[in-house]
Image: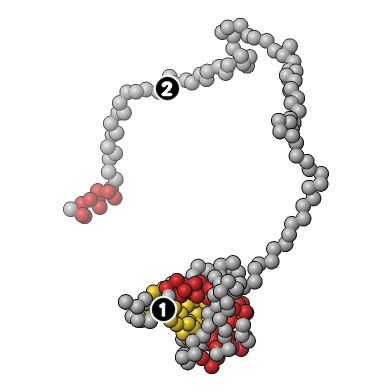
């Protein structure tokens, strides 16, 4: 049974975290092509970039293009089922070290063959994107040295005990209050006028003439 093959399909989607100018520059360097041809590739609704690939080779192509900033799908050529369409994580810029040693070439059988016909395939092992430039740190260590094994790095200096004068302090006798402030005398309240006897019943007041008139009219 023949091993299944796959193709790399690009549908014009740029990954988040990339802008068009950055993606154009990355692809132009990968494909070794002019920016105008890359613009035609980005504007095409669908382009088969490579076909007849094994699973491992298709995955390497896909990761290389994701590192450049475009989202591609790996589609099985026998069944036509999409095997990987999820976009890669959002990146602030295209990492040079993440790209594998492969360059995607355009398939001349597609509608965009005229725009990408000048693309070439690099040799195995060629770095696709240049490495990130790192500034070398210059640290002066001329004043530092390495002590011998067992050497005392910091000399121990005993801390003298604190000198605290307690001559003015004393111990009070047992039971004597510590606070000499005299206590506040209790307040005296006169409750002679208060009583707990029951409240006498209220005497019903004699109704007025107006109240009598109103009550009689209601009845």
Q: Residues within 10 Å of mark 2 (few under 14, many from 20)?
A: few
Q: Earlier along the polypeptide chain: callout 2 or callout 1?
A: 1
Pick out the residue farthest to the front.
1
In the rendered structure, find residue 77 and report the number of the disc placed on it: none
The residue beneath circle 2 is 193
Residue at image position (56%, 8%) is: 175
Residue at image position (72%, 14%) is: 166
Residue at image position (35%, 81%) is: 78
Tell me which corner region of the image, top left, top right, bottom left or bottom right, holds residue 192: top left
Q: Is residue 215 left or right of residue 26?
A: left
Q: Nearer the viewer, residue 200 or 73?
A: 73
Q: Is residue 96 above or below residue 189?
A: below
Q: Is residue 151 above or below residue 22?
A: above
Q: Nearer the viewer, residue 13 or 78?
A: 78
Tell me which corner region of the image, top left, top right, bottom left or bottom right, holds residue 94: bottom right
Q: Label 2: state its secondary structure.
A: loop
Q: Is residue 108 left or right of residue 179?
A: left
The residue beneath circle 1 is 6
Q: Nearer the viewer, mark 2 or mark 1?
A: 1
Q: Position of residue 107 (x, y in %)?
A: 49, 87
Q: Position of residue 134 (x, y in %)?
A: 69, 63
Would residue 194 be seen by someone viewing this image from the given angle?
Answer: yes
Would residue 67 be seen by someone viewing this image from the given angle?
Answer: no
The number of callouts visible is: 2
Q: Is residue 30 above or below residue 170?
A: below
Pick out the residue farthest to the left.
219
Q: Position of residue 86 (x, y in %)?
A: 43, 72
Q: Quadrant of the N terminus?
A: bottom left
Tell me which corner region of the image, top left, top right, bottom left or bottom right, holds residue 129: bottom right
Q: CA distance from mark 2 to mark 1?
A: 108 Å
Pick out the residue farthest to the right.
143
């Amino acid at each position: 049974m023949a091993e299944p093959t796959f193709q790399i399909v690009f549908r014009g989607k740029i990954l988040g975290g990339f802008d068009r100018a950055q993606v154009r520059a990355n692809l132009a360097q990968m494909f070794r092509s002019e920016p105008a041809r890359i613009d035609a590739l980005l504007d095409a609704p669908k382009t088969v970039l490579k076909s007849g690939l094994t699973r491992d080779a298709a995955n390497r192509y896909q990761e290389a293009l994701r590192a450049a900033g475009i989202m591609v799908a790996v589609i099985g050529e026998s069944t036509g089922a999409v095997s990987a369409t999820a976009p890669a994580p959002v990146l602030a810029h295209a990492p040079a070290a993440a790209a594998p040693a492969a360059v995607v070439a355009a398939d001349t059988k597609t509608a965009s063959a005229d725009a990408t016909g000048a693309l070439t395939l690099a040799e195995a092992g060629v770095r696709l994107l240049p490495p990130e430039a790192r500034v070398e740190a210059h640290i002066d260590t001329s004043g530092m040295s390495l002590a011998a094994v067992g050497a005392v790095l910091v000399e121990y200096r005993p801390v003298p005990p604190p000198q605290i004068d307690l001559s003015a302090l004393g111990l009070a006798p047992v039971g004597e209050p510590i606070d000499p402030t005299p206590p506040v005398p209790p307040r005296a309240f006169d409750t002679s006028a208060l009583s707990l006897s029951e409240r006498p019943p209220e005497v019903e007041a004699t109704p007025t003439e107006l109240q009598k008139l109103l009550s009689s009219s209601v009845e």
